């Protein structure tokens, strides 16, 4: 059986009306849910792997296009988890697919995963593309692409290029967009866990919005 069909059928069979309203409300009623929570979602995904096999990496672009436009938001989560499982971020030009995902059915619940785990993973294997592409996205009118540039180094720890992160933050310190202010603070707070002094100095020297400032210093 086709992987997408099999997975979709599992979610239809396991719809939980008791959870749907709360899950949809939490996501501002932007998406339709099956009411399947995280643990069960991962169980259903694993069961589909066992039944029809883990898709070959060459199938992933087509599967992604299908799942990313599927009716249930949970299938979008399964899609990005499949891409991570198969380490699709190693593939040349995978960033084209990731960009499409960020720009399609966009909200923080998928964008943050894609930023930190897929885009972040991609540039570890394709560093020669990083600076030019992230500077381009950082200037985009698409707020989710901008947010991605601020968050893609979240998991880098000691490998974080803090000078480049600051370069990506500075054009947006006056932004009134909640998701940008929050991302600035989150990125700074996360790097501070590895190297606190440069973050403290940057926050002290920069006129950040109150939300960004508060988030950056949350653990101090």
Image: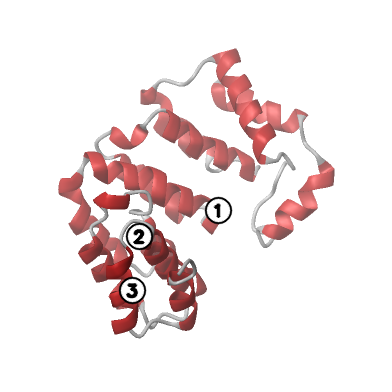
Q: Position of residue 112 (x, y in %)?
A: 47, 53
Label 1 SS: helix
Q: Are marks 1 and 2 in contact (CB under 8 Å)?
A: no
Which residue bears the numbered disc 2?
191
Q: CA separation, marks 3 and 2?
A: 11 Å
Q: Residue at x 73, y 32 (%)?
A: 12
Q: Residue at x 44, y 75 (%)?
A: 212
Foreground disc of the pair 1, 3: 3
Q: Residue at x 21, y 42 (%)?
A: 126
Q: CA separation, marks 1 and 3?
A: 28 Å
Q: Position of residue 158 (x, y in %)?
A: 27, 51
**Where 38 sits versus 48, above or below?**
below
| Colour setup of the view | secondary structure
Which residue bears the numbered disc 3?
200
Q: Are marks 1 and 3 in contact (CB under 8 Å)?
A: no
Q: Earlier in the sequence, mark 1 or mark 2?
A: 1
Q: Nearer the viewer, residue 75 or 183?
A: 183
Q: Earlier in the sequence, mark 3 or mark 2?
A: 2
Which residue bears the numbered disc 1?
109
Q: Nearer the viewer, residue 116 or 194?
A: 194
Q: Position of residue 30 (x, y in %)?
A: 64, 58
Is the residue marked by circle 1 packed among few (<14), some (14-19), or many (20+) residues within 10 Å? few
Badge count? 3
Q: Quadrant of residue 107?
A: bottom right
Residue at the extreme bottom: 207
Q: Quadrant of residue 189?
A: bottom left
């Amino acid at each position: 059986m086709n992987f997408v069909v099999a997975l979709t059928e599992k979610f239809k069979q396991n719809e939980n009306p008791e959870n749907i309203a709360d899950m949809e409300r939490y996501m501002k009623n932007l998406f339709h849910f099956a009411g399947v929570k995280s643990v069960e979602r991962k169980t259903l995904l694993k069961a589909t792997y066992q039944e029809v096999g883990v898709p070959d990496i060459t199938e992933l672009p087509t599967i992604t296009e299908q799942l990313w436009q599927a009716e249930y938001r949970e299938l979008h989560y399964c899609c990005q988890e499949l891409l991570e499982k198969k380490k699709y971020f190693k593939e040349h030009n995978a960033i084209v697919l990731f960009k499409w995902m960020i720009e399609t059915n966009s909200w923080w619940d998928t964008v943050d995963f894609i930023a930190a785990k897929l885009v972040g993973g991609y540039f570890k294997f394709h560093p020669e593309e990083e600076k030019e592409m992230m500077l381009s996205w950082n200037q985009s009118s698409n707020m989710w692409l901008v947010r991605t540039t601020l968050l893609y180094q979240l998991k880098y720890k000691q490998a974080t290029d803090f000078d480049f992160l600051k370069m990506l933050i500075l054009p947006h310190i006056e932004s009134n967009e909640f998701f940008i202010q929050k991302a600035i603070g989150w990125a700074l707070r996360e790097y501070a866990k590895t190297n606190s002094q440069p973050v403290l100095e940057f926050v002290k020297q920069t006129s950040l919005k109150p939300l960004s400032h508060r988030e950056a210093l949350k653990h101090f």
